[in-house]
Each structure stands twice: as structure tokens, then as C-alpha cells.
Amino acid sequence: MEKKVIALIAHDNMKQSIIEFCNDYKDILCNHTLVGTGTTSKRISEATGLTVTGYKSGPLGGDQQIGASIVEGRTDIVIFFSDPLTAQPHDPDVKALLRIAQVYDIPIANNRSTAEYIMHSDLLEK
């Protein structure tokens, strides 16, 4: 099985949801390299015991760092639990990340249902 680099991101109101997701899929996620934005990576690591390499927080450039890693071919999958009901001050950065994932044909899950499809995909192991 080829290890994938999976980026984990969550807006403030979605952090508990991504932690629950990571706990539920810990047995799969532990076989891959995990990265994430600041607070999200720290909270996931503390709550699950998974090793998640942290970038800056989203508003301080973390979304852009993950976008750059996609461009450089260093990120394979993005799981981004975004909050569709709350305005985000760094919305242009979020949109840029989503755009770059589309441009580079990177799977990106914006909700738990889509993230679960990725976790159950045979392609995760290729």
C-alpha cells in the first residue's frame, strides 16, 4: 500500500466533527501521513493520538501552505470540514485552496459523507 498525504482542515465550528471522524477512521488514517492547519492538527493529535504535522492556522496562511503542497505534488487528499453557515474572514484563502485542489485533480471532501467515501475507496490503497 502506498502511503498518501492527507490534509485535515476544519473551521472552528467543525473541529469536533473532524476529531470524531478521525477517531472513527483512526485505523485507516494511521497508515498515512497526516498534515493539517494549526489548531485543527493539534486538536486531532491530542484527541486521537494520531500524528498530524501542523502548518500555520488557516487565517495565518495554513490554507495557502496546503495549497502550495498540492502544487508541489506533496498532498494527495484534502479533508476540509468547512462551516457553510458562518462567514470566514479568510474566505479568499479557502476559495484559493478549493480551486487549486480542483486544478490539480486532488480529491477534496468538504463533509463527513464525502470523507467516508474516500476512506472506503479502493483508490486509497493504490
Image (cartoon, rainbow, N blue to C red):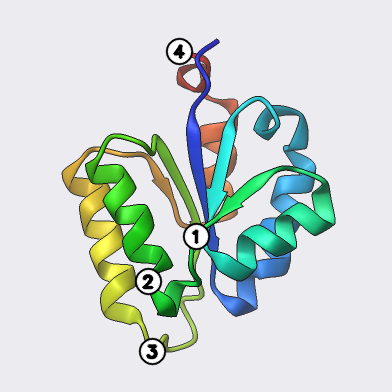
Residue type highlighted by circle 2: Gly
Q: Earlier in the sequence, mark 4 or mark 2?
A: 2
Q: Earlier in the sequence, mark 2 or mark 3?
A: 2
Cα gap from disc 3 to disc 1, whole angstroms: 18 Å
Q: Earlier in the sequence, mark 1 or mark 2?
A: 1
Mark 4 neighbour density, 10 Å: few (under 14) some (14–19) many (20 or more)? few
Q: Decide: is 86 above or below 2.
A: below
Residue in front for this viewpoint, 113 or 82: 82
Q: What label does residue 55 carry, if any?
A: 1
List the residue tagged with mark 4: 126
Q: Decide: is 94 above or below 5.
A: below
User: Residue 79's spot in the image, x, y percent?
Assistant: 50, 50
Quarter of the figure with the C terminus: top left
Residue type highlighted by circle 3: Pro
How many labels, in total?
4
Residue in front for this viewpoint, 118 or 68: 68
User: Residue 103's spot in the image, x, y percent?
Assistant: 16, 46
List the residue tagged with mark 2: 61
Q: Decide: is 41 above or below 106.
A: below
Quarter of the figure with the N terminus: top right
Q: Earlier in the sequence, mark 4 or mark 1?
A: 1
List the residue tagged with mark 3: 89
Q: What label does residue 100 carry, if any?
A: none
Cα gap from disc 4 to disc 1, whole angstroms: 26 Å
Cα gap from disc 2 to disc 3, whole angstroms: 12 Å
Compared across the picture, whether 101 is left or right of 14 comes to left
